[in-house]
């Protein structure tokens, strides 16, 4: 089995349908790997509306058919490996891609699929990139850089899975698909 990778697909929702870019393999395109994408399988529930009548026991809580879930933030550690000449440009191009500011960008809403955990989420957006960068100068001819990015997961329940196709005997991801639970 090969290296487990992370794929990100830029999207834009116009209120009816999604426009989607290509599912980008971060390692192939930017030389960047992800330590883990710690998506929550079941995030925290939202506070439900209630009346806590002073003269009565307990509380009167409106409970819908499905309890709504909160959006959440996650910190993700990325590792870059490449030449010193390309490091700044590759990391900058990656960050521009996350913010939807790259050339040919489809949108800043992201669908993410992590092969390590076997699923992902949609409506993920980059909210912050740490200015702290761990940089290792003593690794062969290539350099290592480690940095943290914070994402907001705005849709905490729709699962993203990969649609694969066979390319000359090699399984490759062609698109990211959504399944609402």
Image (cartoon, rainbow, N blue to C red):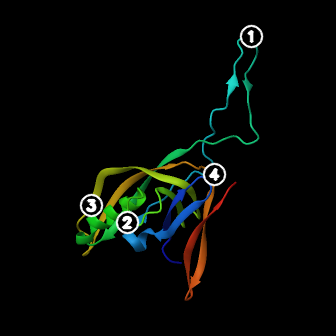
Is label 2 in contact with label 3 (beta carbons under 8 Å)?
no
Packing grade of label 2 (10 A; few <14, some 14-19, many >=20) is few
Residue 175 coordinates in the image, percent (x, y) = 57, 70
Q: Where is residue 139? Give x, y as percent.
A: 27, 70
Residue to which mark 1 is pinned: 55
Between 167 and 140, which is closer to the camera in this rendering?
A: 167
Question: Mark 4 or mark 1, which is nearer the start of the sequence?
Answer: 1
Q: Which comes before the other along the chain, label 4 or label 2?
A: 2
The residue indicated by pointer 2 is 103
Residues at marks 3 and 1, CA–CA distance in whole angstroms: 63 Å
**Residue 114 left/right relative to 144:** right
Decide: is 57 above or below 28. above
Tag 1's secondary structure? loop
| Alpha carbon separation for disc pair 1 and 2 | 62 Å
As drawn, 90 above or below 48: below
- Distance from disc 1 to disc 4, alpha carbons, whole Å, reads 38 Å
Q: Mark 4 points at which residue?
A: 157
Quarter occupied by the C terminus: bottom right
Question: What mark, if any, has residue 135 been given in the picture?
Answer: 3
Marks 1/2 in contact by CB < 8 Å: the verdict is no
Lateral position of residue 143 relative to residue 34, left or right: left
**Badge 1 local density, few (<14 within 10 Å), some, or many (20+)?**
few
Query: Label 4, label 2: how many angstroms apart (C-alpha)?
Result: 30 Å
The mark that comes first in sequence, 3 or 1, is 1
Q: Nearer the viewer, mark 1 or mark 2?
A: 2
Q: What residue do we see at 74% from left, 10% from top? A: 55
Going 31% across and 61% down the picture, which residue do you hit? 92
* First reached walking from the N terminus: tag 4 or tag 3: 3
Would you call the spot at circle 4 few (<14 residues within 10 Å), some (14-19), or many (20 or more)? many
Helix, strand or loop at mark 4: loop
Say whether disc 1 or disc 2 marks the residue closer to the N-terminus. 1
Which quarter of the picture shows residue 137?
A: bottom left
């Amino acid at each position: 089995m090969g290296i487990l990778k992370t794929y990100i697909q830029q999207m834009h929702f116009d209120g009816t349908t999604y426009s989607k870019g290509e599912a980008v393999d971060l390692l192939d395109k930017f030389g960047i790997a992800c330590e883990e994408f710690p998506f929550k399988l079941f995030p925290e529930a939202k506070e439900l509306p209630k009346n806590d009548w002073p003269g009565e026991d307990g509380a009167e809580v409106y409970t819908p058919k499905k309890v709504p879930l909160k959006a959440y933030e996650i910190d993700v550690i990325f590792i870059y490996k490449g030449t010193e000449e390309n490091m700044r440009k590759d990391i900058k191009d990656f960050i521009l891609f996350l913010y939807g500011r790259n050339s040919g960008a489809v949108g800043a809403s992201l669908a993410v699929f992590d092969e390590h955990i076997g699923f992902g989420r949609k409506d993920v957006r980059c909210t912050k990139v740490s200015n702290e960068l761990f940089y290792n100068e003593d690794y062969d001819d290539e350099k290592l850089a480690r940095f943290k990015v914070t994402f907001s997961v705005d849709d905490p329940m729709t699962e993203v899975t990969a649609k694969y196709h066979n390319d000359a005997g090699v399984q490759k991801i062609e698109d990211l698909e959504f399944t609402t639970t």
